[in-house]
Amino acid sequence: MTAVKLTFSPCDHPLDGRLLEVVPGRYDWIHLDLSETVAEATVWLHYRDAVDPEFLRSQPGTSIARIGVPRRGELLAVELPVLPGVRLVGTALT
């Protein structure tokens, strides 16, 4: 299996419960580059026709979190969790 190199779009947002709009589309994964490791938190994926909860967890030994996007509907936004002191510094959608 070949590793995929992710290209993160830089940003700087606190994890304060805000709604982060994405380019509408169908995705398999949302990758977040965070300012620190996160054990687990809930995010809400906003689709054109539904809103679903999913888990945000940092990958072992990194501050990169990967969120699965199981619904095949068009994703419009991600509602970030409230985690004081943690910042979102980059995103990648695949």
Image (cartoon, rainbow, N blue to C red):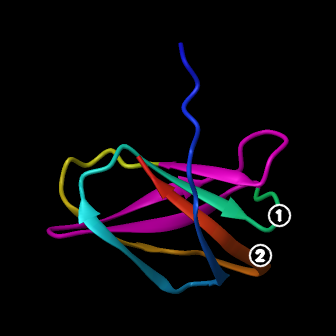
Q: In this rendering, is residue 68 above or below 1? A: below
**Does the residue at mark 2 contact the one at mark 1 (Cβ under 8 Å)?**
yes
Is residue 26 left or right of 86 when viewed as pictured?
left
State the image quarter where residue 49 is shown: bottom left
Whole-number angstrom distance, CA of label 2 to CA of label 1 = 6 Å
Residue at the disc numbered 1: 36
Q: Which mark is residue 86?
A: 2
Q: Could you tell me residue 70's position as x and y percent?
A: 32, 44
Which tag, 2 or 1, sits closer to the chain's start?
A: 1
The crowd level at tag 1 (other Cα within 10 Å; few <14, some 14-19, many 20+) is some
Q: The residue tagged with tag 2: helix, strand or loop?
A: strand
Q: From this viewpoint, which residue is outermost toward the top? A: 1
Q: Secondary structure at mark 1?
A: loop
**Residue at position x 54%, y 32% from top?**
4
The residue at the point 81 percent across, 57 percent down is: 37
Taking the spot 37% from the left edge, 49% from the top edge, the residue there is 69
Q: Horizontally, is 94 left or right of 26 in the view?
A: right
Q: Could you tell me if residue 57 is visible in this image?
A: no
Q: Residue at x 56, y 51 (%)?
A: 7
Q: Which residues are magenta?
A: 39-67
Q: Please, what is the three-letter code of the amino acid marked with disc 1?
A: Glu
> Is residue 46 located in the magenta-colored stretch of the structure?
yes
Q: Is residue 75 visible in this depiction of the protein?
A: yes
Q: Is residue 11 magenta?
A: no
